[in-house]
Image (cartoon, rainbow, N blue to C red):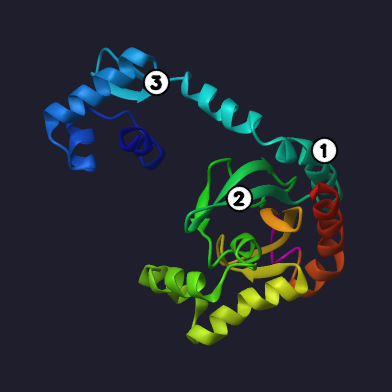
Amino acid sequence: MRVLELFNEHAVPLSIGDIADDTQMGRSAAQRYVYTLHQLGYLSKDEASKKYFPALKLLGLVRGIHRHHSQRDLAYPLLQTLAAETLETVSWVELDGDDVVVLQNLPGAHITAINLPVGSRFPALTSSSGQVLLSQAPESQLSAMLGALAPEVRARFGARSHAEILAIFRKAAQDGHSFTEKNFGDDGVSVSVPVTDSGRVVAAINVSTVHTRFDLAKARKTILPKLEKAAREASI
């Protein structure tokens, strides 16, 4: 699986040597894993360069993941409506360890729309979707995640103290939504609302826009009510 993950990190075909170096495994071990994945149809080989790249068969695994998430699939028309009403990028986001992952995405209608392809990952603590997804998490879990943050990610909280950062998640739980700025560039504005299953937060619906179209006050007034409506209807 680590071999396959490399192709999410590198947008070019990789040689056996590249794979061995990046996975820090021996060349013979890398060769065996690559050979197996190639024989199973999950990697394709360019005969001219002898390098490997992901095969289309991998899409079958993605289809299997989506097939087992009926709540997400049923919510897709709601995301379409929200995207049409706001003209901004709309995403369905779920928690995966310390990260959030975009699992559905409808790009915004503007040239300057935020680009969040399916499969995009972001640190959960500093993203608006992560903040609502973790709004019910115990303080001990949040503290452990905060302590494990890379310095450059921790810097996104600015001069906030540990207690002030934890208060962000309590506020997200109280408000039922979270806003962040500058997560996707200097002009980014992001707002998320949780989706629940029997009261348990299972996903977030996110709208990402830019400050030149929506400052926080305008996003709160215009986008948030539509987003809250979509999340209510997606919840079960």
Give, as a three-letter code, the residue at label 1. Answer: Pro
Task: Say if residue 45 shows up in the picture.
Answer: no
Q: CA distance from mark 1 to mark 3?
A: 32 Å
Q: Is residue 184 left or right of residue 89?
A: left
Question: Is disc 3 in contact with disc 2, using a CB cutoff of under 8 Å?
Answer: no
In the rendered view, tell whether residue 63 sits above or below residue 132. above
Q: Secondary structure at mark 2?
A: strand
Q: Residue at x 58, y 32 (%)?
A: 65
In the rendered view, tell whether residue 64 sits above or below residue 228. above
Task: Say if residue 184 shows up in the picture.
Answer: yes
Residue 102 painted magenta? no
Question: Mark 1 or mark 3: which comes first in sequence?
Answer: 3
Q: Quadrant of residue 107?
A: top right
Q: Residue 228 location, x and y as percent?
A: 83, 59
Give, as a three-letter code, the residue at label 3. Answer: Tyr
In the rendered view, tell whether residue 52 sits above or below residue 214. above
Which residue, given by chain and number where applicable, does mark 1 sit on?
Answer: 77
Q: Secondary structure at mark 3?
A: loop
Which residue, given by chain and number where applicable, does mark 2 sit on?
Answer: 94
The N terminus lies in quadrant? top left
Q: CA distance from mark 3 to mark 2?
A: 25 Å
Q: Which residues are magenta?
A: 205-213
Which residue, given by chain and number where applicable, does mark 3 sit on?
Answer: 42
